[in-house]
Every structure is written in structure tokens, then in C-alpha cells.
């Protein structure tokens, strides 16, 4: 098991480097974004995760029925992507509520 994992990493070392570098790049980019731009970025992230959900559903539909690992990973991708989209919309809605004017309840 360990040897096959090591062999996989050896064959795909470029992919591993790309993933590691993209993690560091993402942390740097997101860490330097001003809070004013949070809402537009959250909307973009919701759109990206919507694509992830659709992709995971397509992959799960084409995988062999006895490939349980692919089905479990696809199911997790759908669930986590859905949670991220819903959470993003909740956060965006809360932030937009801060900019609405409050209605006065007292009668004049």
C-alpha cells in the first residue's frame, strides 16, 4: 500500500507541485483582499462551487457501480460543495443586510 502510494507520487510529482503551489498562491491572494471586495469574491466562489457540484454529479453518473471509492469521493464533493454554496449565500446575504437602511418604526 505504501509502496503504491509512493509510486503514484513519483509518477505525478508535477501535479503534486502544482497543487502545493496553488495552495500557497490562494492563501496569499485571499489574505490580501480588502473586506470591501468580500461580497463579489464570495459570489464568484459560489459560481465556482456550483461548477464543482455539477462536475461531481457527472463523474458519479459515469463511474462504474462497484467503484465505491469514486462514488464516496463524488458524494463528498457534492455535499461539501453544496454546503459551501449555501454558506456563501448566507454570508453574502448577511453582508448585504448591513448596507440596507433601517426603517423607522415610530409614527410621525
Image (spheres, grey):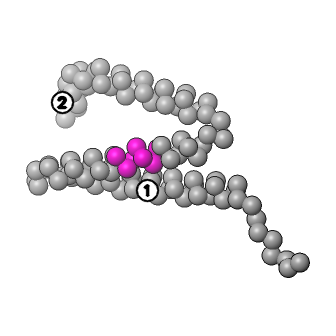
**Residue at 62% over, 58% down:** 94
- Residue 64 - label: none
Query: Can residue 25 be seen in this snapshot?
Result: yes
- In this rendering, position of residue 84 left or right of residue 52: right
From the image, tell me which residue sits under label 2.
Answer: 4
Q: Position of residue 102 (x, y in %)?
A: 76, 65
Which of the 4 quarters of the picture holds residue 103? Answer: bottom right
* Residue lying at the far right of the rendered structure: 108
Q: Percent x, y for residue 85?
A: 44, 53
| Residue 7 as seen in the image, left or right of residue 47 | left
> Quick one: label 1 or label 2, which is nearer the N terminus?
2
Percent of width and height locating residue 28: 55, 27
- Mark 1, Cα crowd under 10 Å, few <14 / some 14-19 / many 20+, is few
Magenta stretch: residue 78 in it?
no
Q: Is residue 48 magenta?
A: yes
- Magenta part mainly helix, strand or loop? helix
Q: From what the image shows, is residue 7 above or below residue 74?
A: above
**Vertical order, 96 against 12 (above or below):** below
Most foreground residue, 101 or 48: 101
Q: Residue at x 21, y 27 (%)?
A: 8
The quarter of the image holding the C terminus is bottom right
Which of the numbered marks, if any, corresponds to residue 83? 1
The magenta region covers: 45-51
Amino acid at each position: 500500500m505504501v509502496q503504491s502510494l509512493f509510486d503514484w507520487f513519483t509518477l505525478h510529482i508535477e501535479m503534486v507541485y502544482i497543487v502545493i503551489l496553488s495552495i500557497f498562491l490562494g492563501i496569499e491572494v485571499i489574505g490580501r483582499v480588502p473586506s470591501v471586495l468580500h461580497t463579489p469574491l464570495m459570489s464568484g466562489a459560489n459560481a465556482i462551487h456550483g461548477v464543482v457540484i455539477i462536475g461531481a454529479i457527472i463523474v458519479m453518473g459515469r463511474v462504474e457501480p462497484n467503484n465505491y471509492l469514486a462514488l464516496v469521493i463524488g458524494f463528498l464533493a457534492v455535499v461539501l460543495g453544496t454546503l459551501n454554496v449555501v454558506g456563501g449565500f448566507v454570508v453574502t446575504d448577511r453582508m448585504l443586510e448591513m448596507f440596507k437602511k433601517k426603517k423607522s418604526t415610530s409614527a410621525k
